[in-house]
Image (cartoon, rainbow, N blue to C red):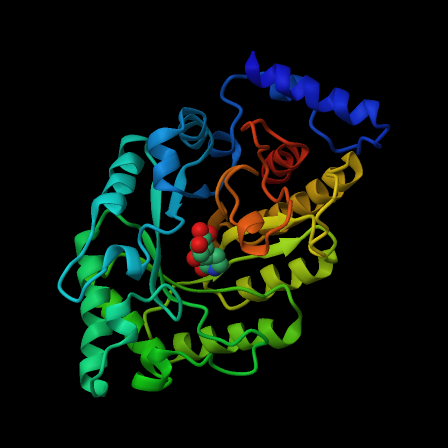
Amino acid sequence: MKIFTSFIIGLLVFDCNKQPIADNNPEPEEEQTADTSLRNLSPFPFGAAVNINLLKNRPAYRNLVIEEFNSVTAENAMKIRFIHPQQNTYDWADADYLVDFAEEHDMRVHGHNLVWHQNLPDWITSFQGDSAAWENIMKTHIQTVVTRYKGRVASWDVVNEALDNDGHGLRESLWLSNLGPDYIARAFEYAHEADPDALLFYNDYGNEFGPTKRNAIVDLVTGLKNRNIPIHGIGMQMHTRFNREDNFHEAAITSAAATGLMVHISELDIAVNPNNDPNLTYTPAIQSQQAQKYFHIARTFHNIADTLRHGITTWNVSDADTWITGRYERPDWPLPFDENYQRKTAYYRILEAVNP
Ligand code: XIL
């Protein structure tokens, strides 16, 4: 009943504002069943990044995650600074909580992430040692974390954002400077040794920026694949914006699929305030344009080969929890659920896209 009511309210809002209702909008009859959810209707895993505090303490958040998603990623809890705060100390509490939660609710866990230039603990940023000592840090971290969740975390972002912002080369980082460019390949090998059944991803942003970054990512993963490095997929973060042209999103998704690797849209959100307007109003017209982007991205993903579809994961759940507002210090409404955990127009367009 709640679902039906919010759908009707959604339609009324649409109507009152005289927004054209596209022909392919969902019919109300299709939306009335209690089991209408992304997890039930999507033919591929549909996930969200989650914040463990909210999962524990905000019932509306927790219930929504349980009802809607069948894949979860820790927004922060598995990152090195949190899970490995001292050289000989691991803090498993939040990651364990998430993995237990996921098993209880029949969800897949996607691990994020093992090797990244950000979120390094002080013991790493101040570490002094030769390349063998650095290699030992990377290998030990990867293998300790992957081994702990062997058989329980289905897939990992092994290396995150190794390319620079524009895709002109590898990003400067402590890993690159201490280990050389082949740290990327070795990170995959170490992870594979620890859990040979886990699917291993290279994760980055900007596939949708244009050909330079897109090709740099494709070249990097193709090079690894051709060397028989155990890489299984491309994670495309896809922190994008409501006014980016569809062909950029389309090229990102189809070029990733053309590698033959699995594809994960791993951190999807669609900002509506890319110019940082402090007074922006989230009008029905903006909502509708944003929903259309969600539709297009989800439908393009739906249309790649089903064997390549690792899934779509949004970066957190609702507009109340998004990292975008804090990161850019601006109002924004980038997710498919509103601040009250109600479904937005974007939500219905995604359902329609994945369940044609
Ligand atoms: C972000 C989180 O959402 C924030 O809470 C945190 O403060 C910083 O990191 N690319 C990634 C994610 O791979 O791990 C980042 O997550 C967003 C950009």
Is 287 on the left-hand or right-hand side of 340? right
Q: Is residue 132 above or below residue 145?
A: below
Quarter of the rendered image showing ligand 1: bottom left
Q: Is residue 43 left or right of residue 195?
A: right
- Along the horizontal axis of the image, is 308 left or right of 246? left
Picture quadrant of residue 84:
bottom left
With respect to residue 276, does 3 lie above or below? above
Give how far across and how far down residue 115 sits, in percent. Answer: 34, 68
Q: Residue at x 69, y 17 (%)?
A: 8
x and y percentages locating residue 159 in the rendered image: 38, 68
Residue 177 found in image quarter: bottom left
Q: How many callouts does the rendering have? A: 0
Q: In the rendered view, would you say 132 is above or below 289? A: below
Q: Is residue 140 above or below residue 56?
A: below
* Residue 41, image x, y percentages: 52, 31
273 to the left or right of 199: right
Q: Is residue 312 visible?
A: yes
> Picture coordinates of residue 225 (x, y %)?
40, 74
The residue closer to the viewer here, 273 or 355, is: 273
Name the quarter where the C terminus is drawn.
Answer: top right
* Residue 45 visible in image: no
**Quadrant that contains the N terminus:** top right
Judged from this view, the residue extending furthest toward the top is: 1
Kindly identify the residue that appears in the image at 61 percent across and 38 percent down.
350
Residue at figure coordinates x 64%, y 45% from the top left: 332
